[in-house]
Amino acid sequence: MEKEIAKVTNSIKRQEAIEKELENSQATLEHIAEQIEAGTPIPDDSKFSGYDEWQTFLEKKIKSKNSSLETIDKQKSLLAAYEFYLKNNAE
């Protein structure tokens, strides 16, 4: 059980980094919308062929990060259950 607790704990530690990535992706998505509205062409050195492709990429990334945060919430509950079990079943 100790290995499982360590695994869950390490996963939970990633929450802050995931939240930061999510925040950055959302800000970039807003910036892209502003660029589209202003009629600004996509930079020549962009790895995307157009703003639509870039938006689609970011939307998928945001969905993935939200899913990761949901998983972390579940892992927090699992960790609490493990800790409760260990506390009440110490031998």
Image (cartoon, rainbow, N blue to C red):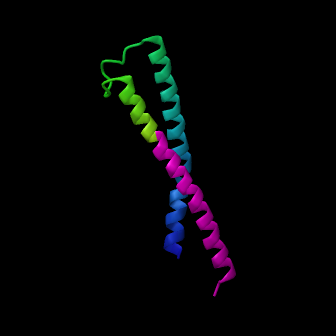
Q: Residue at x 53, y 64 (%)?
A: 8
- Examine the image and state in which quarter residue 52 appears: top left
In percent of the image, x 48 and y 40: which residue is there? Answer: 62
Residue 21 at x, y percent in the picture:
50, 40
Residue farthest along the top direction in this orientation: 39
**In the rendered view, does 88 fall on the left or right side of 58?**
right
Q: Is residue 55 one of those drawn in magenta?
A: no
Residue 58's place in the image compared with 77, above or below, is above
Examine the structure image and report whether residue 82 is included in the region drawn in magenta: yes
Query: What's the residue at 47%, 12% (across, down)?
Result: 38
Span highlighted in magenta in the image:
62-91
Image x and y of residue 69, in percent: 55, 50
Magenta stretch, overall SS: helix
| Total number of numbered discs in the rendering | 0
Q: Position of residue 22 (x, y in %)?
A: 52, 39
Q: Quadrant of the C terminus?
A: bottom right
Residue 68 in the image: x percent, y percent? Answer: 50, 51
Which residue appears at 43% of the width and 11% of the height? Answer: 39
Left or right relative to 56: residue 68: right
Front residue of 9/74: it is: 74
